Image (cartoon, helix red, strand yellow):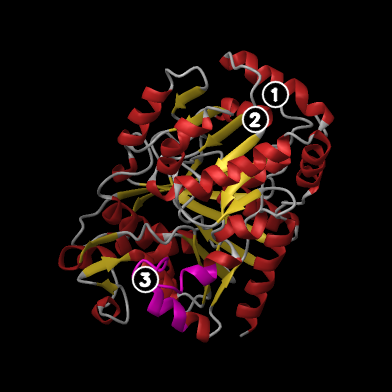
Amino acid sequence: MQVVHVGSEVFPYSRSGGLGDVLGALPTEQARLGAQVTVVSPWYADLAGTPVLVWEGALPEVSGALGSPVVRVGELMEAGVRYVFIGMDLFERPGLYHPDDVWRYSLFSRAVLPVLRRLDVLPDILHGHDWQAGLVVAHAHLAGQRTVFSVHNLQYQGRWNLPEAARWTGLPEWTLGQDGLEFHGDLSLMKGGLTFADHVTTVSPTYALEITTPQYGEGLDGLLVRLTREGRLSGIINGLDQERWDPRTDPDIPAFADASGKAAARTALQQEFGLDGAPVLATVSRLADQKGIDLLVEALPELVKDWNVVVLGGGDPLLTGALMGWSQHARVEFRQGLNEPLAHRIYAGADAFAMPSRFEPCGLSQMISMRYGTLPVVRETGGLVDTVPHDIGFRFQDATPDALLEACRDALAEYGRPQAWAARIERGMALDFSWAGPAGQYLGLYGRLARA
C-alpha cells in the first residue's frame, strides 16, 4: 500500500509540538510494517535538514490570480520513508507559523497533488493532518483520491474572510458554500478537511466523543455528529517514539530502568536547580489557556508548601510574566522556551507531572512522564483519560485550582507511602505506548477505505 501523509511539520526537520512528533514517528512505523510511505511538508527557510533539489519551476495549478510563484521540490530518505519538501518564497521566513498562514498553506495545498504526479507518487490513501492540510484533502476528493483527515486540535481551524480567501483555494465555487468550506462567513480549512475526507480521525477515542458536543466542538459539533452517525469519525490514540524517549538509553540523563534507578536522575535535577528535599511537581508545556497553566499558577501559593514546582515552556505573555514572578520563590523554578535536553532531565528527575488541561486531544507529556517514572496529575479529558490509569496517575474532573490541589494532595499522600509510590512507577514504566498498535490501526483503516 502506498500512503502519503501531508502536514505542516515533521520531526526532526520542523517541529513546534505534537503534530511534528506524530509526523516524525507514525510514517516510520508504517514503513516498518510494509507500507510505501511519503511525507509531504513545507520547505521552511530554517528546515533542520538539507533536501536534495529534484525539481524547480512554475506549476499551473498554483498560478493564475495568485501570480506564478516558483516552486522548489526537495527530497530526503530516512528509515524507509520518503520526505518531500515543497518550497516557495512565502516559506522563506524564520519559524513555522505566521499571521498569513491561511494564504501560505492554501498555496502549499494547491501544489501537493501536482508535485506528487511529477514524482510519480500515486497514493492509495492520502492522509492530511490538521487544518493546514484541509485544502489538500478537498483537492484530493475532487480528483477521486481516497483520503483520511486527522484532527490534532480542533481549536485551530485556519479561518479567513471568505471573499478574500476564496481566490486562494483553486476550488470550484460550489465547494465554498455552507456544505463545504464556509463557516460563519469565513473560509475554514479545517471544515474543508472534515467535509471532504472519506474518514476523519482524532488522536484519541475520548476526544473523538468530546468534539461532538458543544463544549468541545468549536462550532463544528453538528458536522461531527453527522460524521459519527455515518461511521466516518473515530479516534486512534497517538503513540510515543520510545527510542527517542527511553530512560535506559537517554544521553541527557543518568540512565535508569526502574523505580530504584530513578534516584540519580532526581538528585541531578535537584542539584541543577538548587532544590530542597521536597517532592518535585513539574510541567513541560505550551503556556496556553488550553493547557490549564493558569490553574497551576493560581494553585502555587498552596503547592509550594509541600512541593518544589518546575516549569519549562513558553507562550502566553501573561502566564510567562506570572511564572517569572514566581521564580523568585525558593521552591519555584521557571525556564522559558523550548529546550529538549532540559525537558528530558525534568521528565526523568521530577516525582509528579502536572497536566491540568482544559482539553487535551491526546497529549504526549503524560506518556513520557510515566515512561520516565514520573507520575502524572491530570484532568480527566481527551487522551489523558485514555492513557493515564487510575492505579498509576492522579486524575481530577473540574478545571479549577482547587480540583488540581486536591489531586496533588492525593499524590502527596501516596508519595508518603514509598512502596505504593514505587509500585505506581513500575506500572507506569511498563506501559506500552509504541506506535506499532496505532500504525496498524491506521493501515487497517486505509485498507478498508481503499477496498470500498
- Assign the C terminus to one quadrant of the image: bottom right
Residue that carries the numbered disc 2 in the rendered image: 350
Residue that carries the numbered disc 3 in the rendered image: 192
Q: Earlier in the sequence, mark 3 or mark 2?
A: 3
| Callout 3 secondary element | helix
Q: Which is nearer the eye, 427 or 75?
A: 427
Q: Is residue 54 above or below residue 165?
A: above
Q: Is residue 365 above or below residue 198?
A: above
- Assign the N terminus to one quadrant of the image: bottom right
Look at discs 3 and 2 and give the one toward the viewer.
2
Q: Residue at x 46, y 39 (%)?
A: 296
Tell me where the magenta segment starts and ends, as one range: 208-226
Please state if 74 lies on the left or on the right of 407 as rendered.
left
Q: Residue at x 52, y 33 (%)?
A: 303
The answer to whether residue 57 is visible is yes
Q: Earlier in the sequence, mark 1 or mark 3?
A: 3
Q: Residue at x 57, y 16 (%)?
A: 273
Residue type, numbered disc 1: Arg
The answer to if 219 sits in the magenta stretch is yes
Residue that carries the numbered disc 1 in the rendered image: 266
| Callout 2 secondary element | loop
